[in-house]
Amino acid sequence: MTTPAFGSSRTTAAREPSRPLRVAVLGSTGSVGRSVLRVIERHPERFEVAVLAAHRSVDALARQAERHASAHVVVSGRRAGAGRGGIPRRWATDRRGLVESAGRPDVDVVVNAVVGFAGLEPSLRALEAGKRLALANKESLVAGGELLSRAIRRPGQLVPIDSEHSGVLQCLEGHPDGTVQKIVLTASGGPFRGWSSARLAGVQPGDALRHPTWQMGNKITIDSATLANKALEVIEAHFLYGLPYDRIQAVVHPQSVIHSLVEFVDGSVIAQLGFPTMELPILYALTHPGRAPDATLRTFDPVKSSPLTFEPIDLDAFPHFRIGCEAGQTGGAAPVVFNAANEVAVAAFLAGEVSFPRMAGIVEETLDAAAVRSAATLDDVLEADREAREIARRKAGRSRPAGRPRR
């Protein structure tokens, strides 16, 4: 897989569009979705909201729908035909409504900010329909990287929103394929950087939800605390940029100012820097391959930002990173299993049912117990996900299915 399949290696000056781009915001009530709407509202000449979609946050969704009155609205967590419970009749419901909204003819760009595995099928639908997919749902690539690469229909493209992968894409602009030697992704280290394995045993959900540099939803904040998030991003990088795993590295960078670095074959290194905010990579994904001015975003001051430091990842204290990278290297459905087991483990931890260190054990034991299978088709992926969740629930001692976290 090469870079142009998912983005563009062209460098194009920002220009005013002939009409505002129509944007579907899937996961509009979550932290990323709210950031997307703030960016759109600052640039009404460039963007307008075509779709708002959330899982269950009906009140928040209603407030957004009132502000963007022309938008098509979806509540994916309400079954079709069920009592509407105050939901306006014009709103669409259920998972099918979410997937179909990603392919609507009145949509130019689909921002997928859905949490977890639930984002895979909307991503596929958007690419099959020739949309630009601005992807914040990393699980789409982790579980379905090969599926997404085959799903792209012109003029569709995939542009990542994750700050690390947005940074890589920006570093690659103007550089031909075959010139990249290595990609380095950075991690803040989360709230427990420097903690020992023994100290981590007493971590409570409230402790893990206090991230030192980013404001994010609960699921991704826990993933950042365990460094499962960084393993997911390594797998993403493999699919996005076509590099083998031994040429994708991750390091701890506590200041979260440098988001990624790209080393080229001649030894030169280019880094992308910016203060921790999702609004910058969101704006870049919406305007890609151009850029647009935004006076709200904070400018960089190298003196005030110093020093910028780096550390290795502690694999003993944070085994999630090792486990996830090994799943990526195993290939097939192993990344699907890693993702599914991690979602179950995070839900169990947030519910107070398992300890912080036990999450990694649940994931590793599920990978050991799951059947070896391919991930060549959507049915393969769905079956691997289903089986992994069943195994992980047993390992976590959960008597009923853990809900897939969604926005």
Image: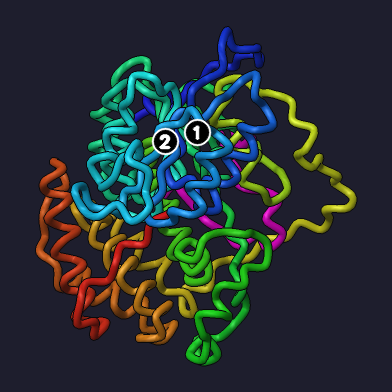
Helix, strand or loop at label 2? It is helix
Residue 336 vertical placement versus 51 (above, below) = below
Residue 393 vertical placement versus 126 (above, below) = below
Q: Residue at x 58, y 37 (%)?
A: 67
Residue 241 numbered tag: 2
* Pointers 1 and 2 in contact (C-beta within 8 Å): yes
Q: How is the image coloured?
A: rainbow
Quadrant of the drawing holding the N terminus: top left
Residues rendered magenta in the picture: 245-268
Residue 180 numbered tag: 1
Left or right of 87 on screen, residue 335: left
Crowd band around label 2 with a 10 angstrom C-alpha radius: few (<14), some (14–19), many (20+)? many
Left or right of 267 on screen, residue 392: left
Left or right of 26 on screen, residue 35: right
Asked if one can make out residue 61 in the rendered structure from this viewpoint, the answer is yes
Task: Point out the frontmost of discs 1 and 2.
Answer: 2
Left or right of 245 on screen, residue 136: right
Quadrant of the drawing holding the C terminus: bottom left
Q: Residue at x 19, y 82 (%)?
A: 399
* Dot 2 amino acid type: Tyr
- Whether residue 28 appears in magenta in the rendering, the answer is no
Q: Position of residue 30 (x, y in %)?
A: 50, 53
Asked if one can make out residue 265 in the rendered structure from this viewpoint, the answer is no
* Dot 1 amino acid type: Val
Q: Residue at x 23, y 85 (%)?
A: 397
